[in-house]
Amino acid sequence: MGKYADSPEWADVVPISQQEHMPAPLAQIAYTDEYAEAMSYLRATMASNELSERVLALTEDIIRLNPSHYTVWLYRFRTLSALPTASLTTELTTFLNPLSLRHLKNYQIWHHRQLLVSAIGSYEGEAEFLVDMFAKDAKNYHVWSYRQWLVRHFKLFHSASELAFTEQLIGEDVRNNSAWNHRWHVNFADGDGLSDSGLVAKELEYAMGKIELAAQNESAWNYLRGLLAKGAGVEESKVVQFAVKYAGLDGGEVKSTHALDLLASIYGKDPAKKESAVQALELLADKYDPIRAPYWRYRLAMVNSGVAAS
Amino acid sequence: MSLASGPGLGGSSPDMLWADKHVEYIVSLDKRDDEYEYWLTEHLRLNGVFWGLHALHILGHPTALPRDDLIRFTMSCWDASSGGFGAAPDHDPHMLYTCSAVQILVMVDGVSVLDEPAEPGSSETKRMRVAHFISSLQDRETGTFHGDKYGEPDTRFLYNALNSLSLLGKLNLVDVPLAVKYIDSCSNADGGYGTVPGAESHSGQIFVCLAALSIAGVLDQRLKDDSKWADRLGGWLSERQISTGKGYGGLNGRPEKEEDVCYAWWVGTSLVMLQRSHWIDRPALRKFILSCQDGEHGGISDRPGHAVDVFHTHFGIVGLSLLEWSENKDGEASEPLGLEEVDPVYCMPRSITKALSRTG
């Protein structure tokens, strides 16, 4: 007896229980009765490849009981695609959105969303929904990957609203590496951005402004280093001038190991500045970052042997 | 194999390894099938068996789970029509579980079950059908792999494919140079790799990309030709070690995130593959992992004070093996924990992958 066994709508289906289907001595799967019954009807409809309204209801039931069951998601999308009456937008807003907000680590949800939005052909409403998702976890890898997919799929490179969004999240947490990565993606992943010296200069200013808020923030320094390494027209002297404010050599104040690291890289390329590079790396190894001392000593050896470290 | 967490909490003294307790803990997971969480984690079942079995191998108890049951359960997850394995019987076949299944069969020296006909009377073997399932998931335009025929691409699946196909001796079925090209397209300005081009660098993805480059046979040459690349990536990975506060010695997976035992593997093995594992403070990392043990009931948690589970138990144990063996190789003395050596590329016992490379 159960929800499905008692329902006249399902009277024509012979459920397939797990026991009959496959013995599994190690890792036998124990279900609650409710879930076991729904699964036995799922096996039956999948076996006959039924794509119907009642299958939508059944898959919804199972997803609510266990949203990580990837098989059922794929079956649900197939069913949605086959039913002329099914509304993909309704699926998105009334079913998927609330579910996503409850199950933050689930990635089936995001793939399902990608299939739906792809089929709908519009990203209307997506930015608004993602604000709610990021409010729950601003570094969620699935959600960021999905947002990058949106940028690629709908060609949103250099979009003012995408940039404003990264600015908002970086404003809320300047150490949000995911937001920094997205900013890089929007600005530079289409391939043209890095050769635009105006854009590179603007982003350099942006990164410097954020470093001023938190000198030891690895994300902002990595962004700056990426621009220095790959961007067109960056004046190295300007970067040095900025970095020395956070890493005084000759007994000055050191506020950031990342600044010392960057100075060591730049100085290390110039034989005339070798002594300064050595000093920066020794400060890292001995005083400011001894947990990685062997790494800094390796860099030191490279500088001393005349091979420029990058 | 139950993936439910607990019952214990990690938080043991950081000076010793409770090896016997961990063996008892893992073996007991097989009997915990009456709990609510057990079926909620059904989608990970075959992975769970892999984590438990591999940890037992590294702990020196490779036969603690019954071999026949392992083979029977693994084959009960096989879908003959597609050739792939699902997470559990009746689940759709997927790359993740297909890779775990092949690794399990190799570990119990049972991969010969795949040399039977795919169906009675068929001239095709199960091995060929599994290999074709994996190779069918390569995107022949970009070189990457999908997890299943509907799903998204991920460098994780690319690694799974190269790992399991090479174990099956069928790497020739896929376009390896194109896969390498795809990995290169996922490289970021910070030296790391993500799931797809442009995705944030993540140490789990760095592990799969480096290991795939190694199986593709190009990693060694790159380390020789491009030491600047290896230095930059090694530097980024070294930055993952937490240098202040209560997570001291632990590793995180991305900048400005919290430490977690599982990164001892993802970051640690990437540094080993880059031949730069001495760049971090290995004794401090060992202490961090040991402090996440439940010394009473066994098991390891993500960080001290949290519930233990089989995922973190596995990655804690293999992380400790990695530390011990890499220190030995570098001639740095450490207190021996007596763990078997783990293969940094395959995430399998070294003794087994060594024997394979001799016969293969």
Image: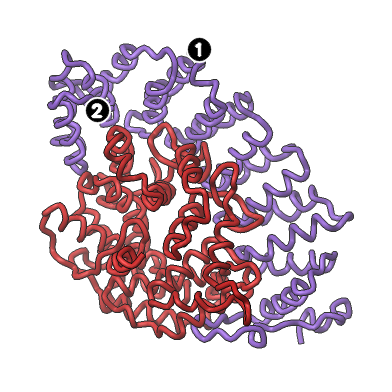
Residue linked to disc 2: A309
In screen coordinates, is A227 left or right of B42? left
Residue A187 visible somewhere in the drawing: yes
Residue B203 visible somewhere in the drawing: no
A148 or B132: nearer the viewer:
B132
The local secondary structure at tag 1 comes to: helix
In screen coordinates, is B229 left or right of A268? right
B222 or A132: nearer the viewer:
B222
Which of the 4 quarters of the picture holds residue B288?
bottom left
Residue B312, relative to residue B189: is it above or below? below
**Chain to which the residue tagged by mark 2 belongs:** A
Where residue A21 appears, as percent x and y from the top left, is: 66, 84
In screen coordinates, is A241 left or right of B282? right
Q: Residue at x 56, y 75 (%)?
A: B77
In screen coordinates, is B190 left or right of B197? left
Where residue A96 appears, as percent x and y from the top left, is: 70, 54
Rate crowding at label 2 as few (under 14), some (14 to 19) or many (20 or more) other CA atoms within 10 Å.
many
Q: Which chain is purple?
A: A
Where residue B299 appears, as percent x and y from the top left, is: 34, 71
At label 2, the amino acid type is Ala
At label 1, the amino acid type is Gly
